Image (tube, helix red, strand yellow):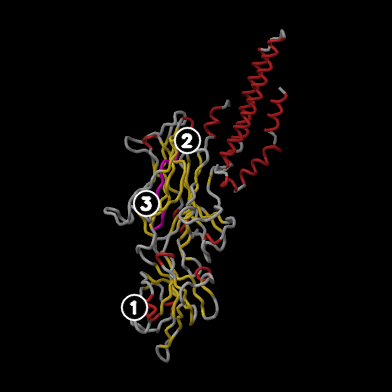
């Protein structure tokens, strides 16, 4: 009796609960544990109830032993002890869950990996935007050097095929569109890269004043010197530094899947995890599935990753804007939002949808019977409804945009992230001129799998930007684990 009372008083005391609950609410290290704070909280509650249950069993056993050796009627004591146990259990659940669970996050995402590995821990949009050097003579339709660099906002190369006076333009790989030119210096030495191999045009550029664009490293081939020259007594032909939208060539992976990625609903499977993968040069949001059982449990032997849609952008009957989205200067935005299912529903699919040129997350949610675990159809053929995050117009009206300037390549730091932006939007852009010569498209995609160590149904899915000031960061997925609290509270005595 003393042990049971002692346990009850200890776990219901403020001094015991407050430090634990505070850690659950404000600690961001749960991404290493692979359980949401609320899952950890429920594990704690289960341990408390199990410990209290063991104390009750010991108490009942003691009364039965007394009854064997002494002429003492313990029936009333046993009945009273059972009533106290049920009352205490209800009080513990009511106090721990009802009073605290709403303030404990159900979100789960991944920490920074120990080592960044391309294709494994992160993915890139490649050869979309590059810093690009071009003489202003080759930007003018009349082949003149009259206009200044910053007058060329959106243009294309002019007269470059056989320019004897300007051989640099002929040597350079052609650029589809030239954007936002500026003058940087009258002289520069350029260390060329191999675009198909390196996913960049230049390793670095050394200006005449000694400034470097990009990292100062050994150049594996002879540098090329470019210098301003005079076309007449008045006009000088200087080199401009612009952005090049490389176009949809074979070297540019700039495609995002628009088809739905979903669990096998007909086999009563639901989404249990999420990750970004690249398949056939297309970025997919891949789902993990598991078979839903009674009381919200998942059969662990059925958990698997659903293979992505196996198509290529060059396949017949595959269409841009319907099957996939192409990142371009005009359409390069992703909404960083989260979508939560209605009470009594779980996530069964996810997709991107184009909304005014921006990619918006949509989540397929399906109602289910908690006691049986069976998914429920809305109609003869409809297994759920698509939910989207609200306030799209407000985000764009008030320019709730993640600021990436000036940013370096995300994997050049392994320090902890300090920026966790959501309920905003983000645009794919180039890295900083000085830090990387504008040669890399940022942000990257975090390709680490986001799933709980104990498979669980999900109430929602989200995207956010995780990064650090001065670096491009990552677009990362997160999952919102199912909220069991209302089912638990419904089972206790009022």
Mark 1 crowdedness (10 Å alpha carbons): few <14, some 14-19, many ≥20: some
Q: Is residue 341 above or below residue 198?
A: above
Q: Nearer the viewer, mark 1 or mark 3?
A: 1
Q: Which residue is depicted at the point 37% across and 71% down?
A: 175
Q: Which residues are magenta?
A: 343-359
Check contact, mark 1 vs mark 2: CB within 8 A.
Answer: no
Q: Which residue is mark 3?
A: 258
Q: Which residue is mark 1?
A: 160
Q: Which residue is mark 2?
A: 300
Expressed as whole percent of the image width and height from the top left, the position of residue 12 reads 68, 33
Image quadrant where one finds the C terminus: top right
Q: Is residue 27 left or right of residue 238?
A: right
Q: Disc 3 to disc 2, how far (Cα)?
A: 29 Å
Q: Disc 1 to disc 3, how far (Cα)?
A: 38 Å
Q: Is residue 220 above or below residue 38?
A: below
Q: Which residue is depicted at the point 47% across and 28% down?
A: 371
Could you say which is closer to the camera, residue 273 or residue 14? Answer: 273
> Element at badge 1?
loop
Check contact, mark 1 vs mark 3: CB within 8 A.
Answer: no
The quarter of the picture where residue 382 lies is top left
Could you say which is closer to the camera, residue 325 or residue 91? Answer: 325
The quarter of the picture where residue 357 lies is bottom left
């Amino acid at each position: 009796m003393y042990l049971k009372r002692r346990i009850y008083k200890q776990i219901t005391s403020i001094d015991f609960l407050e430090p634990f609950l505070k850690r659950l609410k404000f600690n961001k290290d749960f991404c290493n544990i692979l359980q949401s704070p609320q899952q950890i909280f429920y594990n704690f509650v289960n341990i408390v109830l199990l410990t209290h249950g063991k104390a009750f069993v010991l108490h009942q056993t003691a009364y039965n032993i007394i009854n064997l050796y002494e002429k003492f009627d313990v029936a009333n004591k046993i009945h009273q002890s059972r009533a106290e146990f049920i009352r205490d259990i209800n009080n513990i659940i009511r106090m721990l869950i009802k009073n605290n669970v709403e303030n404990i996050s159900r979100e789960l995402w991944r920490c920074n990996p120990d080592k960044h590995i391309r294709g494994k821990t992160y993915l890139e949009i490649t050869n979309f935007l590059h810093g690009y050097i071009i003489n202003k003579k080759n930007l003018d339709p009349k082949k003149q050097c009259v206009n200044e660099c910053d007058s060329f906002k959106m243009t294309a190369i002019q007269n470059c095929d056989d320019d004897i006076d300007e051989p640099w333009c002929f040597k350079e790989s052609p650029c589809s569109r030239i954007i936002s030119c500026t003058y940087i210096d009258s002289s520069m030495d350029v260390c060329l890269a191999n675009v198909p191999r390196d996913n960049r045009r230049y390793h670095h550029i050394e200006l005449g004043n000694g400034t470097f664009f990009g990292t100062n490293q050994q150049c594996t081939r002879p540098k090329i010197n470019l210098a301003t020259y005079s076309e007449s007594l008045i006009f000088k032909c200087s080199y401009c530094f612009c952005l090049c939208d490389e176009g949809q060539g074979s070297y540019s992976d700039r495609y995002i899947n628009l088809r739905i990625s979903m669990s096998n609903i007909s086999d009563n499977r639901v989404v249990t995890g999420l990750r970004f993968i690249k398949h056939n040069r297309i970025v997919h949001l891949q789902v993990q599935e598991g078979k839903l059982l009674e009381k919200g449990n998942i059969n662990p032997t059925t958990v698997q990753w659903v293979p992505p849609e196996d198509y290529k952008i060059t396949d017949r009957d595959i269409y841009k804007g319907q099957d996939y989205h192409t990142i371009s200067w005009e359409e390069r935005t992703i909404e960083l939002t989260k979508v939560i299912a209605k009470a009594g529903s779980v996530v069964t699919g996810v997709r991107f949808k184009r909304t005014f040129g921006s990619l918006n997350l949509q989540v397929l949610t399906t109602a289910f019977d908690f006691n049986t675990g069976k998914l429920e159809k809305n109609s003869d053929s409809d297994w759920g409804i698509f939910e989207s995050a609200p306030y799209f117009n407000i985000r764009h009206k008030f320019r709730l945009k993640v600021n990436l300037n000036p940013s370096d390549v995300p994997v050049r730091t392994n320090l902890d992230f300090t920026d966790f932006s959501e309920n905003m939007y983000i645009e794919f852009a180039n890295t900083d001129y000085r830090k990387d010569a504008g040669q890399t498209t940022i942000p990257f995609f975090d390709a680490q799998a986001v799933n709980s160590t104990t498979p669980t149904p999900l109430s929602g899915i989200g995207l956010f930007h995780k990064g650090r000031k001065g670096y491009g960061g990552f677009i990362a997925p997160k999952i919102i684990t199912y909220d069991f609290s209302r089912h638990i509270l419904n089972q206790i005595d009022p």
